[in-house]
Amino acid sequence: MALHHRGAAVTLYSDKAPLWPPPLEAVMRRMRVDVRPGMPADEIERGPVVHAGASTQEFDLVLLATAAVPQPWLRASGLACDERGFLLTDDMLRSVAHPDVFAAGDCATPSSGPLPRSGVYALRQGEALAASFRNVVRGQEPVVYRPQRHALVLISCGRRYALAHRGHWSAQGRWVWWWKNHIDRKWVKSLTV
Ligand SMILES: Cc1cc2nc3c(=O)[nH]c(=O)nc-3n(C[C@H](O)[C@H](O)[C@H](O)COP(=O)(O)OP(=O)(O)OC[C@H]3O[C@@H](n4cnc5c(N)ncnc54)[C@H](O)[C@@H]3O)c2cc1C
């Protein structure tokens, strides 16, 4: 939607169907983004030309925005990993096989069940990790990390319009954009020295 906002004609291929969060697909269509849910890109060849099922389409530019993958050295390290190669951690963010090794954020999968690999979860894990390190150097137990049940998703749609989603609740409009803008600016300011 940002690319469309800048004047590009955009086609989105996705293996997901429907897209998540639920109102996203309708908003994108309304913004005239050509959305193709359930159509994974099978091949990209020089051109660039995208092959997806029976569809073949030539573009000026192809951008890949696929999910996080683990670093190959994690599996080679001998630390316990899930079937994809992310580090398996306990509820104190420690490696299940090597409790002296901590892992948080995108590189880890909690053994209690996978979490979304997104900044909002990585950030909270980072806070728990910092608290654990302080405890460990004092000879105390690491803190237990309890993930939030739902996270607020805010997606800017261009033209100062945005989409919000949390749990079963959704909202969209210009006010959501101003809300997101306020949160983002406040966050960046908190990191500015
Ligand atoms: C384009 C894009 C847009 C995104 N938008 C959002 C969003 O809007 N909202 C949201 O919540 N999430 C978003 N995410 C996801 C979010 O950025 C990640 O979930 C989050 O950054 C994960 O934090 P992390 O600290 O686990 O990993 P990272 O932020 O990836 O940090 C890992 C760090 O480790 C360093 N590193 C890697 N290997 C080594 C090594 N061998 N030695 C030392 N250092 C190393 C890397 O350079 C990097 O700095 C987005 C991700 C991408 C790619």
Image: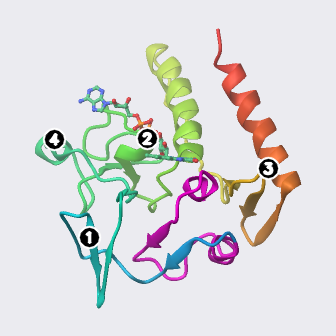
> Within 8 Å of ligand 1, the CB of disc 4?
yes
- Dot 4 falls on a residue whose secondary structure is helix
State the residue position of label 1. Answer: 49
Number of residues whose C-alpha sits closer than 10 Å to that of mark 2, classed few (under 14), some (14–19) or many (20 or more): many
Q: Nearer the viewer, mark 2 or mark 1?
A: 1
Residue placed under numbered mark 2 in the picture: 93
Whether the residue under disc 1 has CB within 8 Å of ligand 1: no
Q: What residue sits right under mark 3 in the picture?
A: 177
Residue at coordinates 43% horizontally, 41% vertically from top-left?
93
Disc 1 marks a residue whose amino acid type is Val
In the rendered structure, the answer to whether residue 94 lies left or right of residue 77 reads right
Q: CA distance from mark 1 to mark 4?
A: 33 Å
Reply yes or no: does residue 79 show up in magenta.
no
Please give the range of residues in magenta: 1-30
Q: Can you identify the residue that label 4 sits on?
A: 73
Image point 45% across, 77% down: which residue?
Answer: 16
Three-letter code, disc 2: Leu
